[in-house]
Image (cartoon, coloured by chain):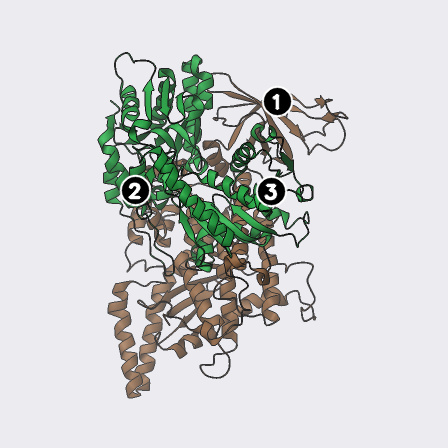
Amino acid sequence: MSIADAAASARAVTEAILGDLAKAERGVVVDSPPGAGKSTLVVAAAASLAERGERVIVVGQTNEQVDDLIDRLASEHGVLRIGRLSAQDYIPADRVYKHQNVTVSSSIADLSEYPLVIATAAKWAMLSNTGLADPGTRWPWAIVDEAYQMRSDALLRIAHLFDKALFVGDPGQLDPFSTVETERWLGLNWDPMSSAVAVLLVNNPGIPVHTLPVSWRLPATAAPVVSSAFYPFSGFTAATELKDRGMTWNTRPFGMTSIDLALQTAADSGWALYELPHRHALRTDGEAVDACAALAARALLRGGVTTSERGQHGVTGERIAIGVAHRDQAAAVRRALRAQALAYPVLASALGGVVADTANRLQGREFDLTIMLHPLSGRRDATAFHLEAGRLCVLASRHRHACVVVARAGIPELLDAHPSAEPVHLGVPVKFPDGWEAHHSLMAHLSQFRVPSE
Amino acid sequence: MTVLTALARAAAATGGRALPTKTVRHVHLAARPLVLVAAQLAGEACAPLAVLVGDDRDKPRLLVVYEPRDRTQRFEFAADLAAIVLPAIESHISACDHGDDGSVERSEPYPDAPQLLVPNQPTASFLRLLGRSTRFRRTEGEHAVHPSVPVLGRWLTYFAERAEVSPSSQLLPMTAVLADHWATGQSAAEDANLAALLAWISPPDGMTAREASRVAEDPVRCPPAGPVTDPTFDNEVLEPILRAAHEAGLTGDAARLSRARADMERALRGQLEPTWALMWRAIDLLDDLSPAAHVEPRWLSDRWSFTNQAAWVRDGGAPQARRDSAVAAARRLARLEREQQRLAVERAYDDPLVMAEYRMTGEAFAGDVVDAEPARIDTAGKRPVLRPWITVATTDEVLFEPGAVLKSPLRPAQQATVKDVVLTGRGITQVVLELKGGMGRSLTPPPGSVPTAGDNVTYTSLKDDFQPALKFPEIQDTPWTHGGPPPEYVPTAEDAREDWS
């Protein structure tokens, strides 16, 4: 598909969504695969509602997401007055502060005249309780961003604030979770552990659901892989063609270490599997963690250049992400990055920009190059947590150009030894895609781009 | 499994003996806990066969259902159980209701609350199901039961729901408590066997842990702790007796029937008594540990919860609903999550071995104070304030960045802000902390309120700060996204019906 065709098909869907918004009785749900222009849609819908004179609230999940959204909205609609409702100790980020048309306040009374008010779900939920607002305060419209990340009990706490709502989110990402036993609510129409969208649709089956058709982020090398592994029924395509995206290196290595080979493979084909020898390891597997940091340092040292529909850009530290499953792994990777910075002082500031975090916290973010520590690497067993499709999907769909997967050998065998054995519960829709199947599907693809570490 | 427990298990396996993984006991242990060991009929979801119950280790009471498939007998059994359990509960109430009928709202909880100890998690689930099958029963009309049965159902349900609240000690499965306090050299599945677990923790004299745990796997010498019975016992002992009793009932042979019933009592007592003895051994082991500092405040919550439930039952409150409404589910989840968070923090504050887990993951560090400026005054603000600085040298890996706000379990009223983190080589990190609060109002800190050089201190990002409860809409305001307001809950005969009963 050419970029123009992709834009046309995306525009057609957006127009259909805005049309549904105009006649909706309760709301509209929009499923958005990775990088399919979800923020663009939110911006368009917010602007379109605001232009019709409807007062709108926007519900984000984290401060980070809210600030990103404000930056987009304020840049594209300079005349729209935007209110940012925040906690008292919130310090406006630069990207919020720089906009003249954005007002930050911790009190809704200061923002009551604004056509568009944005805050996190947690802040909106506090609003109704602290007496900041008249209990009768209601807005005609709400836009709920990242609605699949939102737990249904969070929606319960804010649903009285609006009459109608647009729910936007990525169904392939991580499901909400809890640290306590939640089995007792399985199968209920209002299971507090379900996502906001799941509960909404079960209780209001008439709500129209749209799916955005193309991914602007994922390159043509990644979109078919991610689509078939994680979105087997809805599917999506890349907006760009193979020739539109490219990644090269400024320098040539002396000799070709396995790290260089992995980076070259990733630049050429979009994927690389950097394979360490089979071994059972601790969660913070030192060798695997070091490999992740070494790959990032090497990519910076070699100087990557990306070519895309946005032009040519150097790959800076901020454009590289290292994605992991657990918080302690992220901490270990950050530590390894600091060690790399000591070894290469010239890279210290660039390495400081590299984002090393868990899948949960990388949701909704975009990079040029991602390095992913495979959730099953070095494990003895495959638990439901490590098999979850959403976690793998987030890690495998953050990149615009290339993704290097770091893993110990033996993952397909581990999968075969641990077929998914989750019990089936009455009244709970079977979840697709199945994590076990998705893992196999991705590993099968990666096996073509295998680079042994030694 | 964390790295530390993995290490402890490996050490236990090589050493051939369980290792304590906690320095103190993190659960409350009542002076007279009510111990209950149960057996159910194989192949039925909740058909009680027998229980051994009581608060006196020398005088357990045996209750047997002679025909577990007969529903009338099942509810007669429930009434018999109620006659033992309800007085044990009542004793905590009547002890302090001096003459008044208790209808006044209490400003103090009852001085103590009942505690129910069962061998394992499946027995706790069995009690939950028993509670569900009894709390909706009618006391008049068709299939009427003794009035104490639905009351027992409400109480058993109450205990089962308390067991979901992690800091509660009202219903404790013994294997979970022991496995939390000791690491054995066997798998988690083997740890769920009370006999095998105790074999590792305190093997009988003259036996190693391995020998003892092998004995524990022999269902003849160590019958299962219930509620599931040993299949060989079912086939070779129980089934012939049940058949004999059944035939005697058909032919009206009273002598044969009473003989069969005596056989059954003897057989089931033989199955349950070994576990009864193990339960009291486990209680003695736990009793030897000193309670953690936060056990008492947590038990206070249990006492309050019990006090409120007692008022509810006395006022004839409706049985707990089969299912939570949208609002009730969200409220319960919020409460469970908050309580679990609170428990995690309290355990770490109380126990250096729990804190060690957080030191491993970089959420805490411990070390010696190498430098202290206890009288440092910050004059940057409107008026001078006391802001002592201390420097802590630690060999732990410090992942905190400057600006992080930490707390020390020794001085929970004091905040410590990380000012600087310096790697000094040889694996030692120096952390500079600025202290605030917990030092009175004057500009000189009272002795002991600021650590001095040489003190061993622990700082962590875990905070025991008060978290306000999340607010949810009222049930009648359930929004359209969650199906709108549900009809008011009225218990009906439908509620008592189970697919499996």
Q: Which residue is mark 2?
A: A229
Disc number placed over residue A452 in the picture, else none: none
Q: Residues within 10 Å of mark 1 (few under 14, many from 20)?
A: some
Q: Which residue is mark 1?
A: B453
Give amino acid for label 1: Ala
Q: Is residue A47 visible?
A: yes
Distance CA(mark 2)–CA(mark 1): 59 Å
Instruction: Give how far across and how far down residue A386 sits, in percent.
Output: 35, 41
Q: Are marks 3 and 1 in contact (CB under 8 Å)?
A: no
What residue sits 42% from the left and 55% below the top?
A: A183
**In this picture, residue A95 sits left or right of residue B5:** right
Q: Which residue is mark 3?
A: A117
Instruction: Give how far across and how far down residue A313 sits, in percent.
Output: 40, 21
Instruction: Give how far across and how far down residue A208 sits, in percent.
Output: 43, 54
**Are callouts 2 and 1 both on one chain?**
no
N-terminal label among 3 and 2: 3
Q: Colour of chain A?
A: green
- Which label sits in the foreground, 2 or 1? 2
Distance CA(mark 3)–CA(mark 2): 37 Å
Give amino acid for label 2: Ala
**In this picture, residue A451 sits left or right of residue B86:** left
Q: Colour of chain B?
A: brown
**Are callouts 3 and 1 both on one chain?**
no
Where's the N terminus of chain B, which quadrant? top left
- Which label sits in the foreground, 3 or 1? 3
Quadrant hosting residue B90: bottom right
Q: Chain of mark 3?
A: A
